[in-house]
Image: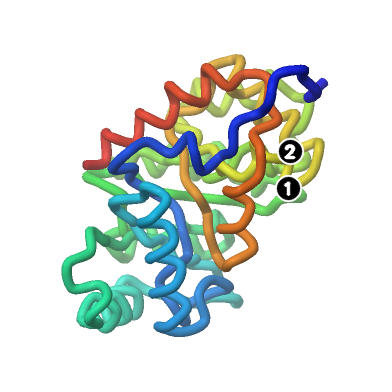
Amino acid sequence: MFFFKKSKPILSDLIPERYIDIHNHVLYGLDDGAANAEESESLHAQMHAMGFETLIMTPHIMSHVWENTPKTIGDRFNNLSGLPHFKNASVRFAAEYMMDDQFHKRMYQEQLLTLKDNFVLVEMSYQQAPLTLYDILFELQVEGYRPVLAHPERYNFLHGNREAYKKLKQVGCLFQLNLAAVTGYYGFAVTKTADLLLKENLYDFTGSDIHHQRHLDAFKNPVIIKNRAHLNGLLEKNEFFR
């Protein structure tokens, strides 16, 4: 399905100038992303050289795993932005929220960290949706938020189910593609699903989801999907977050 006679472009070559990355884990020491300030600096420098102008850093907020809060994230960001490397950098912060058993509590007890205005980045387990998924998405919107679902191509239980993806869109969920998926980094099934969602024009935005050097190195790999024209147009949509 993914073999062509023409040479395939390298993912990093497709990154638009002044690209705004709305999903990454470059903010150090808060989750499974960058471990320290030096790693944050290294990742940011390489991403900037690749064309990433603005990073919206989105640490995980996940019950019993990464118990981050707007304060802990904000404090760490202030530490990072005070470093010489970041003083003139275009960086902001938000969060990637797991829709888990504590998400309702967070939604009602604190102002969620958003990518811009009312757009909030959410995720769920790769193996199964929360039983209250549609209730959560409904309540988020009642509270005035726009849910942006991180990497829908990576949820194994949705693979091959077009109607499930379309239902999520119909109830107001926006989709964010993990860019490395188009290189095969996450495996054949994920790449195939990303290609299908691109073909169906179901994606709204893109993000790197870079946690570490291996993720960054994946951007040096060729793009193996069929629907590259759709990808090129999609990459420009992150201008919305300027």
> According to the image, what is the colour scheme of the structure?
rainbow
The relative height of residue 126 versus residue 183 in the rendered view (above or below) is: below
Residue 38: % across, % down: 43, 83
Q: Residue at x 31, y 71 (%)?
A: 70
| Amino acid bearing label 1 | Tyr
Q: Name the element at disc 1.
A: loop
The numbered disc on residue 186 is 1
Q: Amino acid at mark 2?
A: Val
Horizontally, residue 227 falls left or right of residue 21, namely right
Which image quarter holds the N terminus?
top right
Image quarter in which the C terminus is found: top left
Hey, which quadrant is residue 4 in on the image? top right
On the question of residue 196 being in view, the answer is: yes
- Considering the numbered disc 2 on the image, is that residue within a helix, a strand or a loop? helix
Q: Outermost residue, left direction?
A: 88
Q: Nearer the viewer, residue 137 or 182?
A: 182
Q: Is residue 142 visible?
A: no
Q: Residue at x 59, y 38 (%)?
A: 10
Q: Tell me the number on the disc at residue 190.
A: 2
Could you tell me residue 62's position as x and y percent? 54, 68
What residue is drawn where x is 29% and y is 51%? 53
12 lies left or right of 75:
right
Q: Residue at the spot x=52%, y=19% of the render?
A: 230
Q: Say which of 73 and 5 sits in front.
A: 5
Q: CA distance from mark 2 to mark 1?
A: 6 Å
Circles 2 and 1: CB atoms closer than 8 Å: yes
Rendered image quadrant of residue 226? top right
Q: Which mark is residue 211?
A: none
